[in-house]
Image (cartoon, helix red, strand yellow):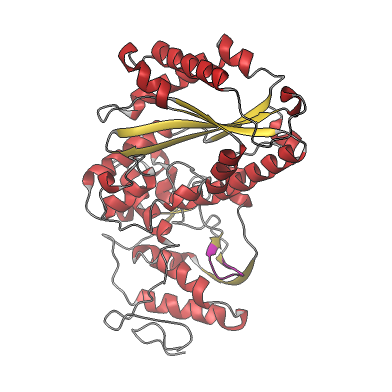
Amino acid sequence: MTVSNNLGINGKSINRQSNEGAYVPESNRFKKYDLQRVAGGLLYAHGKDMKEQHRTCWCHRGVANVTDSVQLYRANDGKSSRMHGVTTCKSVWACPVCSAKICAVRQSELSTAMAAWIGQGGYVWLMTMTFPHQITQALADTLPAFTKAKAFFKNCKTYKRILSKGVRKGSVTSLEVTVGDNGWHPHQHDLVFATPTAFGNVKERDKKLESREIDELKYAWYVALLKAGLCEPAQMTDVLAHGLDVRGGQFAAEYIAKFGKDQAWGMSREVTMHASKVGSDNKGAHPFQLLAWYMAGDDKAGAQFREYVEAFEGKRMLSWSRGLKKDLTGEDETTDDQAEEKALPEETRIGSIDSEALSILQSRRLLANFLAYVAAYCDQTADSQELVNDYIAWAKTLPRMTKGHVKTKMHSRGFMHADREAMES
């Protein structure tokens, strides 16, 4: 087949801008691949060996096995596509692509557990803990203190009395952070699975703790924050009002339904929107939104993203009480690596590309565009490989957008990675 400089000689395969000849996706669904590349660039440490770089720097930039090609899969509903056989970082904090996959699995696990527990007559509350924060506070300073405060709180007599084992079967904790006008806003959500026998024969699914008990918990949280150095006595009124919140089953269900959905990072917003414009409630934005702001020229956002990744590296996003997940879902608790591998929709293999084609897509910064193209047009397996080949041939005619050709090297573990020269662009 003859390939012109304008992709889309097959009329079925392409919609293009008249002045560019490039495929223009109809949605931002694949924007996370562009943001992933930005994250890798921000986290790349100049002068360090490849083995010392953050793993997100290499995510989706090489084939996992030198002898294999990269397989292409398209969701049967046409909403997504993916590559199998590429290197992935599986970082829930630093990588927009891997995080979205992991969060999708976590959301499904939480929904299953909550439905099972309510089906047994139990209750689920949503308890949220946070602390006063200021724009001058660094995450590296506040997160360790936040961990201490949570330990003080859950080991205090008030917590053990009100949420004893007779009341609480277990909890699932989720660590989160947003950024806004007042700086970083770390907070933790606890899904508390309360036993049906704790309240006698009551039948309401949204049974709540009594207001007196909630007030006691709020004061205990204030004391824990004092001990951890995260508030002052003069802030007691503010902490009692906003530091800890306990809500019933409906709020827990709404939280589970949206869990991970905030990973859309406000992509429906203009990427040039400044942080101060994100929501009138001043709750701020997800750190991945910082990548979009950095793309739009906000250097401060780039520095904030690096600060965030460094502070959260190695922390667990989601934790279950021992045995709780097994009891409610029949599955053991999984690592983020295992969760990333489970996040697969109903899909069909439509073709493959080799390592050279992957390098072409990366060096032209077309990976997001290519995957959107596959999802939109490769719905007929008979000609999908031909359409893929046409796209790669067209992409090859474009100039590279790096300082050099994206070459591949053997990693010590047998992975193929982009070289240093490409990463430093």
Q: Which residues are magenta?
A: 72-82
Q: Is residue 131 above or below residue 288?
A: above
Is 73 a magenta residue? yes
Of 206 and 22, the residue lying toward us: 206
Measured as percent of width and height from the top left, residue 188 is found at: 48, 31
Of 411 and 341, the residue lying toward us: 341
Horizontal side of residue 353 vs 346, given as left or right: left
The reply to whether residue 380 is in sight is yes
The reply to whether residue 88 is in sight is no
Q: Is residue 93 above or below residue 343?
A: above
Q: Is residue 27 above or below residue 228?
A: below
Q: How many marks?
A: 0
* Quadrant in the picture for residue 300: top left
Residue depicted at 36% across the width and 39% down the height? 283
Residue depicted at 69% across the width and 45% down the height? 112
Q: Quadrant of the C terminus?
A: bottom left
Of 288 and 226, the residue lying toward us: 226
Horizontal side of residue 115 vs 172, given as left or right: right
Horizontal side of residue 196 vs 126, given as left or right: right
Measured as percent of width and height from the top left, residue 174 is found at: 53, 34
Of 123 and 303, the residue lying toward us: 123
Measured as percent of width and height from the top left, residue 168 is found at: 67, 24
Is 235 a magenta residue? no
Measured as percent of width and height from the top left, residue 77 is found at: 59, 70
Residue depicted at 50% across the width and 53% down the height? 87
